[in-house]
Image (cartoon, rainbow, N blue to C red):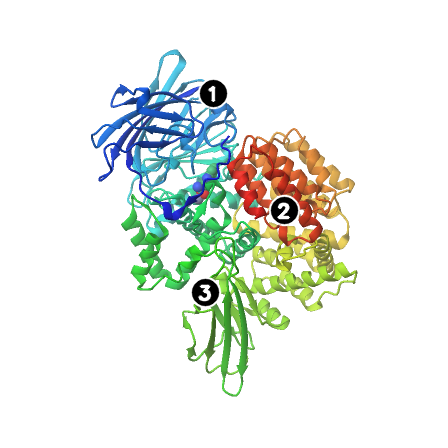
Amino acid sequence: MRTDTGQVFRLEDYRPSDYRITHTDLLFRLDPHATLVTAKLTVERRDGVAANAPLVLDGDGLVLESLGLNGAPLAGEGYTATPDRLEIRAVPAEKFFELEIVTKVSPVTNKALMGLYQSKGNYCTQCEAEGFRRITYYLDRPDNLSTFQVRIEARKAEAPVLLSNGNPVEHGDLADGWHYAVWHDPFPKPSYLFALVGGDLGSIHDTFTTASGRKVALGIYVEHGKEPLATYAMDALKRSMRWDEERFSREYDLDVFNIVAVSDFNMGAMENKGLNIFNDKYVLADPETATDVDYAGIEAVIAHEYFHNWTGNRITCRDWFQLCLKEGLTVYRDHEFSADQRSRPVKRIAEVRNLRSLQFPEDQGPLAHPVRPRRYKEINNFYTSTVYEKGSEVVRMIHTILGPEKFRAGMDLYFERHDGQAVTIEDFLACFAEVSGRDLTQFALWYHQAGTPRVTVTTSHDPATGDFEVNISQTVPPTPSEAVKKPMHIPLAFGLLGPNGDEMEMGSVEGAEVNDGVIHLTAASQTIRFRGVGSRPVLSLNRGFSAPIVLNQDLTKEDRLFLARHDSDLFNRWEALNSLFVEALIAAAAREKEGKPHDFDAALVEAAIEIAGNDGLEPAYRALALSLPSEADVAREIGNDVDPDAVRAARDALRREIGGKGRDAFRRIYDQHADSGPFSPDAASAGKRSLRNVLLDYLAAAEAAPELAALQFETANNMTDRAAALTVLAHQFPEHEATRKALAAFDARYRDNGLVMDKWFVVQATIPGAATLERVKSLTAHPAFSLMNPNRVRSLVGAFSSGNQTGFHRADGAGYQFLADIILSLDRHNPQVAARLATAFRSWRSMEEVRQLEARKALERINAEASLSRDVKDIVERTLA
Ligand code: TRP
Ligand code: ZN
């Protein structure tokens, strides 16, 4: 395993390599324990580089079998090979030369799931970010663009399917039951986009005709017998391909596009050129086993990886500091795709909830880093929600600032100017500056400064003059990356609501650039005056969450209730109600600590009940509006000295209160929205199910009885309703006989299906309360659980540590110690996933004192382990700093 060497990589140290590999010819002879890899590299010395400059290639745990230069074996004095590096000093004088490297790797023992490994007996690869160097010595950096030709040889019985990037060239039989296939990728690409698959797989096939009339063969490869479960993914793929043509004029460029689903995978999926490899969680679905959330996830991830073909592959990153160049932009594109395919406001609310629950805590804790970091020790630890989700928000702000036409012109210029290149955030921004004539220097701070900006707003209205004054100030809190911050360019979409709830006309505006419904905040503090505003308006600000900030606005409860009823911006309508819930829960948690009874505002409870029955709003939207902020949401708003048990009691009480008052109405709506007819995963049907399932949670709380949930569990004809009922049972009635029965029935029915058992693990791992730790510990011994499979680890241990406030943050520290044990044991074979788990400690300093001490103990115990991986060491050190 790669242990920590303390090396730090810095953005300012970037320099091009002395040599380039322009063509890569690979031969694989697949064997579980001893795969031979022969790499013939065409190497070019860059102009101006001295003829005797050594060629230094990256490796990671490699065993060199042989080495040749221009067709002749290379003598031992000419080079130095270690597992991590190959240095060739005997470089020939010509500008071009050929290097032949033979390495031997063992896929079956590769449990880190990086490089060439096996999943359920099938060979596959994962090379981003630095996995290719576990296959052969190479210039394993994204600015080395090479064409690839790949020949795969395998035992035909073991691996009848042989795939790689690009287009198929030829295939045929060899002696002794072996066969081969050759693939050629004409598009120069960095090594992180290399992929190979060899195995005994089933598949489904389709075709797509591009806008210009080229026919593309599409294939999705899955475990035998699972073919029918890939049809939704295939449909999502075709819709993605069409959407990218219509929205961005981006056409697909190869003759084939293949997707392979594997069950052991460190993340969601990987955009390898022409051969995407997926965590099977994001491919396989049918009504029996997948929830509506799973379907939406498949659609989004299929789109995301497909969109990378242009934003990531055709135009790639100069270095890993530029990761957001491809990830932030591609997330923005998949968000827009899903918004177009489903409900835009519902999608936006879900995005913001996700951003707040994952990115905000990151930005507000010890792991905070800029969207474009300037230093890293382990790049795997920077595939974060800041780079992905905040990176997407930054692109969305460019769209808001420039408007749709200029934004599109900027994208067109980017594609035209940088196709085939490895570029930087500066290159990207320059395209938008150029087409709009705007100076984006201040805006670029969104890439360079970490931390969530806090924006404070006060307003005053003078009925005599008709002046409406808005004072806005911003601060960005210090983070480990920068102690002092500069004011940012914050685009705030807004509207003024008149007394009848209509949008108000506004006269002239001064004090800031204000156009197209957007206030451009650029100074630390600004006063904006609207003239000719007859009566006091209610300011609806940061509409559609136009900027990823924390907003403190001087709105009264009545203002918020007014916005919740009348705002034409559906995001802000949701936001108004949500902020009232958060406030109510913070107050209730404080009362809980003082032993006082609850006194929830009747108007708020009324508003919630009213929204449930508002037929003018789509069911999915109503479901979101009725979903109370999570315990973690409330904890984050409290900020410090958090007592999770008080938060949980407050949330339970508010749910009981709303459920009790809304009981009859909720029951009526619940019955009205019962599914009729066969299951369909479309957004409207899914919306009805989600409304119904939110109401089920309230009804069970109001009745303090599991019968309705138990009935739904037994009669459900789809996984969405079954899993929702199981969650209500387990979370509200963990010790009840009905819950015990349901959990056992689910286990009996699905124990051989890992993906479905993930739901069973999540449900149990997130049962509130101190007792859950013992349950989670015993579930680690369940036959469906395995520390070798990242999905299982995430669904049991990940869900517990990052999704169970009262269980993980037990006051006695036992939750922390359990996580430390798992991290230490996992780190021995899969550092990447172990490091990801360790990020659950990131908010430890916001807990009350007793828990802080316990968390520190656990972190220090991990840190004391001598052979810690670079991945875990980096996270733990930054968390403790
Ligand atoms: N680039 C991939 C995506 O977002 C994610 C990815 C990065 C990944 N590193 C990985 C996936 C390692 C699996 C393993 O689209
Ligand atoms: Zn991506």
The location of residue 247, given as percent across then percent down, is: 37, 52
The residue that mark 3 highlights is 487
Is residue 253 at all visible to an observer of this figure? yes
The residue that mark 1 highlights is 32
Q: Mark 2 vs mark 1: which is more N-terminal?
A: 1
Residue at the image position 42 percent from the left and 34 percent from the top: 127
Quadrant in the picture for residue 95: top left
Whether 155 is drawn above or below 273: the answer is above
- The residue nearer to you, when weighing 320 against 582, is 320
Q: Which mark is residue 803?
A: 2
Quadrant in the picture for residue 552: bottom right
Residue most extreme to the left: 94
Callout 3 crowding tier (Cα within 10 Å): few <14, some 14–19, many ≥20: some
- The residue nearer to you, when weighing 155 against 10, is 10
The location of residue 302, given as percent across then percent down, is: 45, 42
Mark 3, mark 2: which one is toward the viewer?
3
Residue at the image position 35 percent from the left and 15 percent from the top: 174
SS class, disc 3: loop
Mark 3, mark 1: which one is toward the viewer?
3
Q: Is residue 45 left or right of residue 640?
A: left
Q: Amino acid at mark 3?
A: Pro
